[in-house]
Amino acid sequence: MINSMTGYAAAASEGETFSVSVEIRSVNSRHLDTVLRLPHAWQALEGRIKAAVSDRLVRGRVEVRVDIRDVSEAAERFDVDTGRARAYAEALGRLCAAVGVQDAVPLELVARLDGVIRPAEAPADPDACWHELQPCLQQALKDLEDMRAREGRFLAEDFERRLAFLEARVEKVARASRDLPDLYRRRLEARIGELTQGVIEIDPARIAQEAAFLADRSDISEEIVRLRSHIDQFRHLMDGPEAAGRRLNFLLQEMNRELNTIGSKTEKAAVAHMVVEMKAELEKIREQIQNVE
């Protein structure tokens, strides 16, 4: 199965107790790396959120931003620090006396000072919050998966075009390499003819034997068979149900190894040229594979 590791999704919900929002971004990475940004008061939910991510995603750097607001009646209560307010009022009174101001210190001024009036801190209830957060998180993860799947389909179409090109070139290389014994025989005859100037009679059987030996050393039939198999396996993994990025990357390495062997064995310029073309296509696939989950 081909899924991209790049995606974005967001979801939000408003419940009776909590208002929650989730934003998820993902990019490519060798492993699953979840980076969570969560309000400090709700750090107890970190394990549940990361577990939900790992249940649905296999690879990628996943940045999850979670916002949680308490919208219950308890959130509308405020605490008053009367001791702090009294200290502020006394300090302001001394300041007024010091600068000769006779006006009374306004209550509104004291009330606005830091820490005098603050929201009442209700005890965090992770279970109640998770009840609201979990559906929102799951929706964002589903939307992220959908986006990664859409990107994956585009990648799969590109891979299929390049695999078809590679497949056609492999068959051309196979056909171009079938006449190697005749090629080596002609080369040997020409070379021996140049060296002997026709003085020594050439044994056709001996020439054929040497040509066959050289052709056997340059035989690429096994490499052709393995390349065909790797291409078939590549398609099988793309159509399979599991994340295939790592195994596809390994297959590309094997395909590149077979092409290197063919290039080192062949003495035909046309075959060498096709090997270069195929390696260029493999490199383009390799670049794209880095973003496959």
Image (cartoon, rainbow, N blue to C red):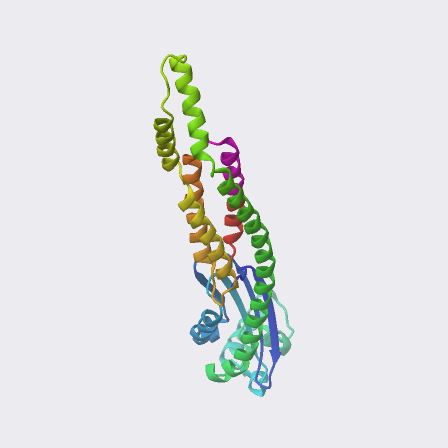
For image coordinates 37% across by 37% down, the residue present is: 216
Asked if residue 274 lies in the magenta stretch, the reply is yes
Q: Nearer the viewer, residue 191 or 41?
A: 191
Q: Place residue 151 in its image quadrant.
A: bottom right
Quick check: 254 above or below 128?
above
Q: Is residue 100 left or right of residue 262?
A: right
Q: Nearer the viewer, residue 140 or 180?
A: 180
Q: Nearer the viewer, residue 83 or 120?
A: 120
What is the magenta range? 267-278
Q: Is residue 49 left or right of residue 6?
A: left
Q: What main secondary structure does the magenta stretch of the protein show? A: helix
For image coordinates 47% across by 83% down, the residue present is: 127
Q: How many marks?
A: 0
| Residue 121 appearing in the image | no
For image coordinates 43% across by 39% down, the residue present is: 262
Q: Place residue 155 in its image quadrant.
A: bottom right
| Residue 88 appearing in the image | yes
Q: Which x, y percent locates residue 278?
A: 52, 42
Q: Which x, y percent locates residue 7?
A: 57, 62
Asked if residue 15 lies in the magenta stretch, the reply is no
Quick check: 34 above or below 256?
below
Quick check: 52 above or below 283?
below
Q: Nearer the viewer, residue 207 or 214?
A: 207
Q: Which x, y percent locates residue 124?
A: 47, 81
Quick check: 252 above or below 36?
above
Q: Is residue 271 left or right of residue 99?
A: left
Q: Which x, y percent locates residue 244?
A: 47, 61
